[in-house]
Amino acid sequence: RVMSKTSYFTKVDGKKITSAENIVKRHGGVLGLCAIVLSSPYDIPNHVPEALMLLCEHSHDPDLIQKSIKKALSEFRRTHHDSWHEHREKFTEDQLVILADVLISPSYYA
């Protein structure tokens, strides 16, 4: 959860500015989560739904991070589509709603 708490803003002279170092830290965490999600392309281990929810929390982060998340979610959808009727049972109803919102949001296709 450290990644979620890493702000990509830093205050300088009382003004918020984007911190490249913090974006890199957060992007590193996102890439790690992407690797976890994509490590089982045709199965859903118990830890994957939570990893997907963490990715969804960051789907509106800066472009660099968004692109990594979109790519991972697109690949996840592609590899799990055929057996989704079975895979969906690994998720709670709330998780399914969140995942659907992120997968069909206008920014996902932009």
Image (cartoon, rainbow, N blue to C red):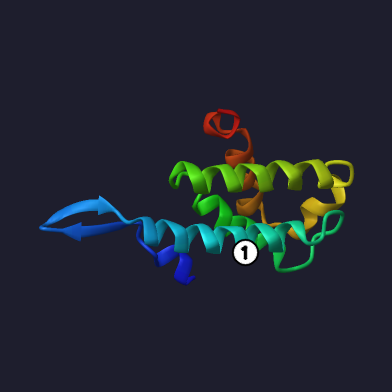
Q: Residue furthest bottom?
A: 2
Q: Residue at x 56, y 50 (%)?
A: 56
Instruction: Describe residue 21's horizontal placement relative to residue 72 as left or right.
Output: left
Quarter-wise, where is residue 103 in the image?
top right
Q: Nearer the viewer, residue 56 or 8?
A: 8
- Quarter of the image that includes the C terminus: top right
* Mark 1: few/some/many CA within 10 Å (<14, 14-19, 20+): few
Q: Circle 1 sits on which residue? A: 32
Q: Residue at x 63, y 53 (%)?
A: 95
* Residue 55 percent location from the top left of the image: 57, 54
Regarding residue 36, the answer to whether it shows in the image is yes
Q: Nearer the viewer, residue 99 or 12?
A: 12
* Residue 81 percent location from the top left of the image: 83, 41
Instruction: Describe residue 23's horizontal placement relative to residue 84 as left or right.
Output: left
Number of disc labels: 1
Assign a secondary structure to mark 1: helix
Q: Nearer the viewer, residue 93 or 9?
A: 9
Quarter-wise, where is residue 109 in the image?
top right
Amino acid type, label 1: Gly
* Residue 71 percent location from the top left of the image: 66, 43
Regarding residue 98, the answer to whether it shows in the image is no
Q: Residue at x 62, y 33 (%)?
A: 104
Q: Residue furthest left?
A: 13
* Residue 58 percent location from the top left of the image: 49, 52
